[in-house]
Image (cartoon, helix red, strand yellow):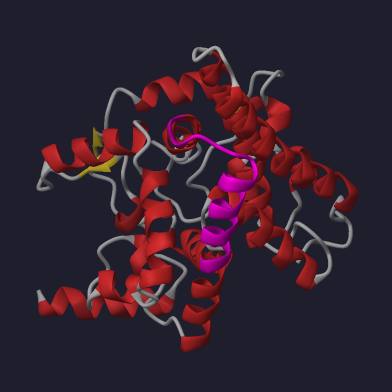
Amino acid sequence: MSNMNYPISQKLNISFLLLALLGWGTFQYLASHTHAPWMIFIYGVGFSLAMTICYSLLHESAHKLLFQNKKANYLGGAALGLIFIVSMSAFKKIHHGHHLRNRTDLEMFDLYYADDNKSSKVVMWYGILIGLVWPLCAFLTIAAFFIPPICKVLLHNKPIWTNSYAFLDATKFNLFRIWLEAFAILSFQLGMFFILDLKLAPFLILYAMHAFSWSSQNYVNHAFSPRDIINGAHNLKLNPLLKPFYLNWNYHLAHHQNPGIPWIHLPKFVETSKVSSYGMAYLKLWKGPRLTTEPAPKSLDSEFELYQSSMDSIQ
């Protein structure tokens, strides 16, 4: 929950939430009904910015910082999940795990050890940058409707990736709520597709542009940062024209150091002398992963440490 000295700006959050939902519908409708095909890509830019707001608010909801009321916070996050195509409950479990295991080997995509398979690391890295992360999230969300225990199936007794490990202790209630959210997402997307008379190609192009925009930026706040659970992130300076859409998501180090502080107050926790360029940080991503000899930090998840030790002993 948020600190009482730093209250949640609920009116501002609901305004942005409505803007994201309205932006989703508006740009999808315009893209499907334009007579100039090239305009689809213009609408795609607007759509990507609306989805940037969506993700920033989804992130707030995962930290119970979207609305003060618990139910309102969940429902707001679930509503955002309808357009982002992600289960709010699944996202929350994954994201909380991220705060516990940040910069450990399971989340080390930007670096590789001398004995790692460099080629596979490079392929994975550029797969992230060209936008393959979001389609995977969306696919698994939809798959969760048809195969409720999909995350446990993927885990199969070993932490293939952070996201699958997060569901090792998933209860039947957790899986049911994820299934219910997946059903709501599928129903919403299909329903709006027909209500707004959307066309498949423009619909997919807009989501493809969002996938590239979000996926390629998703790791910029952590890439090449210190291998430290809490301090393994950056505070980055954004272009003033883009900053309003990110809701201070770029002040990610401040967020990891103060995860209970709402986005609107994060600038108060940023040392301006240690803020670097968002654009330069993004461009550095495209140089590819780097060799490291720095050891992994010990995670804040004691159960994960025990689990990893048991898997190491089996291997």
Question: Is residue 210 placed above or below 161 in the rendered structure?
Answer: above
Magenta stretch in the rendered image: 183-201
Q: Residue at x 14, y 79 (%)?
A: 313
Query: Is most of the magenta stretch helix, strand or loop?
Result: helix
Percent coordinates x, y for residue 216 in the rendering: 42, 33
Q: Position of residue 170 (x, y in %)?
A: 44, 81
Residue 234 visible to an observer of this rendering:
yes
From the viewer's perspective, is residue 136 above or below residue 65?
Answer: above
Res. 162 image quadrant: bottom left
Query: Residue 241 appears at what percent x and percent y?
Result: 70, 18
Quarter holding the N terminus? Answer: bottom right
Q: How many numbered discs?
A: 0
Q: Is residue 185 left or right of residue 118?
A: right
Q: Looking at the image, which residue is at 64% across and 41% down?
A: 196
The image shows residue 303, relative to residue 248, as above or below, that is below
Residue 296 in view: no
Using residue 139 as the reference point, say whether residue 13 is left or right of it: right
Does the stretch in magenta take in 208? no
Residue 181 versus residue 283 in the image, above or below: below
Question: Outermost residue, bottom direction?
Answer: 172
The quarter of the image holding the C terminus is: bottom left
Name the residue nearer the viewer: 192 or 204: 192
The spot of residue 229 in percent (x, y) is 47, 56
Left or right position of 168 against 25:
left
**Which residue lies at the image location 47% right of the left edge and 79% below the top edge?**
175
